[in-house]
Image: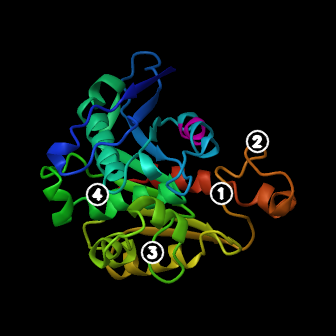
Amino acid sequence: MQIRTVPLAIDYASKGATPPSKQATLTVYELPVYGTVNVLRPAVLICPGGAYAWISEREAEPVAASFLAAGCNAYVLSYTVAESGRFPCALIEAFEAIRLIRENASDSHSDPNRIWICGFSAGGHLAASAGILWNHPFVRGLGFPDGKHRPDGMILGYPVITSGTFSHRESIRNLLGESANEETLALNSLERQVTGDVPPTFLWHTAADQSVPVQNSLFLADALIRHGVETEVHIYPLGEHGLSTARYDVLTPGRFSSDPFIRQSVPTWMHDAIRFIFAERT
């Protein structure tokens, strides 16, 4: 397995964005070819959470390791957060990362038609923004006209979705700043932006989430289904926010994580998500 971290060289100014004070990076986890069979692997771009204020390590490498074990190449995006750069910097970085993975797919034995984006919490908002807004006039105006930046599917864990009622205000404030106008707020209320162009989506949340209410996922699931997007949704009754893979090595000691249901049932989301990625589609 090859692991390396590469900086994302982006001309933000040409896209009408203020350059961030810290450079975004992509950590690459790529599997070698075993034997003589040249297998094209799905690629998964992972956007950890952190309320658009930091990058959660618990939702980075542990998630990448699970996708690697299933035969996917994995990539962790350390994107712009909080005061280092506001919207749309992180979205530009996600699109550039997807385009970079796609353009170099042959070198990594990745399938250029199976590039998925996976995100958690605020990183789920970023991942969902990439999958929902990729063909939006706003994004085309950023300099992404050709579709090479489009993810082929989304895996979203307890995502921030709405900027309205049930919003995670801290994430939206860190993303947009204190004085976002109504147009920008509406653009980032992703349940309002869904069209039939959204790729297949796997979505999971816990009903007990006290940080990002489950309504975020329910709003999105409703919009996806109404627009005919292939959607799989899992709502678990128990579990605090930020469960990541929900394995013992990433769970917060105490609280809900001591419940046998969390240890035994919630981790199945990864198995189901991998099945969803590898499903045959026409």
**Residue 236 to residue 71: above or below:** below
Q: Are marks 3 and 4 in contact (CB under 8 Å)?
A: no
Location of mark 4 (residue): 282
| Residue 37 screen position, x and y as percent | 39, 22
The residue wearing badge 3 is: 162
Residue topped by disc 2: 249
Q: Residues within 10 Å of mark 2 (few under 14, many from 20)?
A: few
The first of marks 3 and 4 along the sequence is: 3
Q: Single out the mark in the foreground, 3 or 4.
A: 3
**Residue 65 lies in magenta, yes or no?**
yes
- Amino acid type, residue under disc 4 in the picture: Thr
Counting residues from the N terminus, which is met first, the one under dot 1 or under dot 3? 3
Q: Amino acid at mark 3?
A: Thr
Q: Earlier in the sequence, mark 4 or mark 1?
A: 1
**Which badge, 2 or 1, is on the more N-terminal residue?**
1
Three-letter amino acid code at the position of disc 2: Asp
Of badges 4 and 1, nearer the viewer stands 1
Q: Quadrant of residue 194?
A: bottom left
Q: CA distance from mark 2 to mark 1?
A: 13 Å
- Secondary structure at badge 4 equals loop
Residue 83 numbered tag: none
- Choose between 226 and 84: the one closer to the eye: 84
Residue at which label 1 appears: 242
Residue 256 is situated, as x and y percent measured from the top left of the image, at: 81, 63
Inter-mark Cα distance, 4 to 1: 34 Å
Q: Give the distance between the C-alpha atoms of the residues marked 2 and 3, in whole angstroms.
A: 30 Å
The residue at the point 13 percent across, 49 percent down is 146
Nearer to the camera, 69 or 56: 56
The part of the chain drawn in magenta is 63-67
Q: CB of mark 2 within 8 Å of CB of mark 4?
A: no
